[in-house]
Image (cartoon, rainbow, N blue to C red):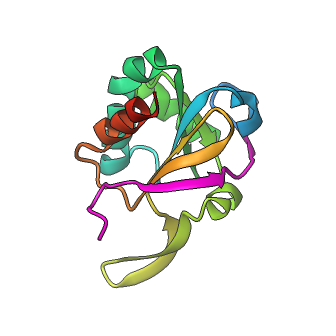
Amino acid sequence: MKKVNEPAVTKRKAPAFTLPASNGEKVSLADYKGRKVVIYFYPQDNTPTCTQQSCDFRDYNGKFAELGVEVIGISPDELKSHDKFIAKYELPFLLLSDTNHKIAEKYGVWALKKLYGREYMGIIRSTFLINEKGYIVKEWSKVKIKNHVQSVLDAVLEMK
């Protein structure tokens, strides 16, 4: 049985996407061909767990950059929300806006959730490590924040 925060090992092609980004441009997965990419899906800007997750990726961003890895965050939030979130927490990477959750659906992270007895559709906190050829090599689902980013970094180091 898989432990919490243990990644699933896959070798499937990462679903293509083009989304509006916090830099004012449209960003596609194809833009990163030839580079490793970490994509993390999170439910909402400025919520406690999502803020911790994004700040953890921020704090490790230099290590990922040294290894030639780009980090990208995706949520259903509007770009205006992303702009405030980036400014408030000095996030050094792009946040993409998936307001209609089509890309989250492609990645299998838009699902039925339950909170306090209420059911609703939302993002399942997940991270994907994509290799230079555009294949998902590791995938973390239902991410628990503690030590998660270190686990992702360890997976990148194992790729070398």
Q: State which region is magenta.
A: 1-19
For the N terminus, the image quarter is bottom left
Residue 134 seen anywhere in this rendered image of the structure:
yes
Q: Residue at x 68, y 36 (%)?
A: 133
* On screen, residue 7 above or below 147: below
> Is residue 35 rendered magenta in the image?
no
Measuring from the top left, give residue 103's x and y in whole percent. 68, 55
Front-lying residue, 158 or 122: 158
- Residue 136 at x, y percent in the picture: 58, 48
Taking 85 as reference, is 60 left or right? left
Residue 49 lies, in percent from the top left, at 31, 49
- Residue 19 in the image: state x and y as whole percent: 73, 42
Residue nearest the observer in this picture, 8 or 82:
8
Give the residue at x 74% y 29%: 31
Of residues 109 and 49, which is closer to you in this image? 109
Left or right? Give the position of 58 relative to 25.
Answer: left
Say if 139 sits above or below 155 in the image: below
Above/below status of 66 relative to 128: above
Residue at screen point 46% across, 19% down: 67
| Residue 78 at least partly seen | no
- Residue 52 placement: quadrant: top left
Q: Residue at x 38, y 62 (%)?
A: 142
